[in-house]
Image (cartoon, grey):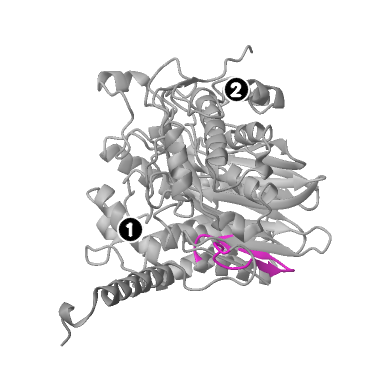
Amino acid sequence: MYTSATFSTSTLLFLSKVLITSALFAISAHTIAYDRITGEPFASRSEVIAQNGMVATSQPLATQVALDVLKQGGNAIDAAIAANAMLGLVEPTGCGIGGDLFAIVWDAKTKRLHGLNASGRSPKSLTMDYFKEQRLEKIPAFGALPVSVPGAVDGWFMLNERFGSKSMQELLSPAIAYARNGFPVSELIAYYFERNQARIGEYPGFNETFTINGKTPRKGQIFKNPNLATTYEKIATGGRDAFYKGDIARTIGAFMKSQGGFLSYDDMASHTSNWIDPVSSNYRGYDVWELPPNGQGIAALQILNVLELYDIEGMERDSAEFVHTFVEAKKLAFEDRAKYYADPEFNEIPVDWLISKGYAKQRQKLINPYKASRRLDAGKNDGDTIYLTVADKDGNMVSLIQSNYRGMGSGMIPTDLGFVLQNRGEMFALDENHFNSYAPGKRPFHTIIPAFITRNNQPMMSFGVMGGGTQPQMHAQIIVNMIDFGMNLQEAGDAPRILHSGSSQPEGDIMTDGGYISLESGFSQKTRRELMKMGHSIRDVNGAFGGYQAIMRDNKSGVYYGASETRKDGQAAGY
């Protein structure tokens, strides 16, 4: 046995250095298993490339279902519906037919974009007076009160009737089979199942529907949802009316009444979705398309309009200069988001003005390049989710996003139907003077947004990033990563992200504290220190940076590029 007396001081110092170096090497080796020989070192993999079709979803089984539909002659719209139905089974922690849906479709025949708003409205029998009587200052996150009409199923049928080539029976059959026979739960979904049980496990039907012997399914465990299979079968054979005017709607109405809720059969039966025109702004030669409110998509356009006024390409991405510029642009956009974004059927929303270049120049003057802003007003005008994308051999492309809100939604699980109703109504404000104030039969402010890029009137890219209020920020970052920093489709999603939180929510239009910045681990300590010197607050968060899927088309060769990042269980695949 050796003791410290055995070695000289110089030898001990040498050994200490060796041990420290070895420890650091071990940490480094544990953090980075290998160096990539092409592309950016932070990229998780290269892009997926294929000629005939491409699918990117947040769950591999859903990707494979959609790919099968394409191989069997279905088009991109068919495959997207099949994937969404599958995700409602395998990823109920983020989506399902109890929620809403938005989509942007590039139709190869008409060579134009079409937008779909399949979000539901508030119960007609619930009025602002009820909230006053209950002395509520905010709509609760869970339970019966935040439930609005689920619009996703109507969205499927709207898409299918206009663009689809296969029957709904064919498109829902894979998810029905998996629901009856079971599927192995993936790692991230197992984690979110457990978290959601802590939130809504007390509500009727949760344990019966989403647990195995009272415990949420663990990674790799086979999970079945026979009630959802039965519900899907009724929808497949009975059409959209089976959901909105048949036994399913009656079950929902009766259950909600038993829970003290207001959503009724009549609310379900009167639901309609709307085809809408996407809106765009050009960023350095690329037309970026979003859907107008009641969603938050135009916030991404507002951020990009301000960023275009700066030499972003000349900045280092890992620098306080870039992060500060991005965050200040985001703050400006989100103040307008908090004030103006709401149901356009109840408000005259100045969309053209908000996404105009002139307004961006006006707002940019409020940014101090050396100091974080603490208080901003919205401009004054005179006048947890899944994302998937599919492309087919004919050039059709779909950008689709669907959500329960807050993971598994309200906790309201209608008797024996196999899904949770959304809690999107929580987003309403209880200030009667606010654009997004609660009213019967009104659509709430929405966070879920699909995106699309065209160039020279040709489709280029269908993409989205899941994650509540993070989405416009991440849409803008994906575009900046590709256009200003020269990243490819996969690298743009894998690159470390910036998240600014704590500014205005839809209930108000004043930001009083400047919020805080969260940076993923790829940003240096130097950047963090310099941001703090500029007055920014830095706060580490885990798992809040969204989930990205994307497909890009090379219009000369017809080749598709697909990407799905490592923050989720997702997969991009083509053939």
Residue 138 figure quarter: top left
Horizontal and vertical percent position of residue 61: 50, 68
Horizontal and vertical percent position of residue 185: 38, 68
Please tell me the numbered disc located at residue 549: none
Q: Is 282 inside the magenta-drawn segment?
A: no
Tell me if residue 330 comes above or below residue 17 in the rendering.
above
Q: Is residue 308 visible?
A: yes
Callout 2: helix, strand or loop?
loop
Q: Front-most of 437 and 129?
A: 437
Q: Is 52 inside the magenta-drawn segment?
A: yes
> The C terminus is located in which quarter?
bottom right
Residue assigned mark 1 = 193
Please tell me the numbered disc located at residue 349: 2
Label 2 or label 1, whichever comes before in sequence order: 1
Magenta stretch: give its range.
41-59
Residue 170 figure quarter: bottom right
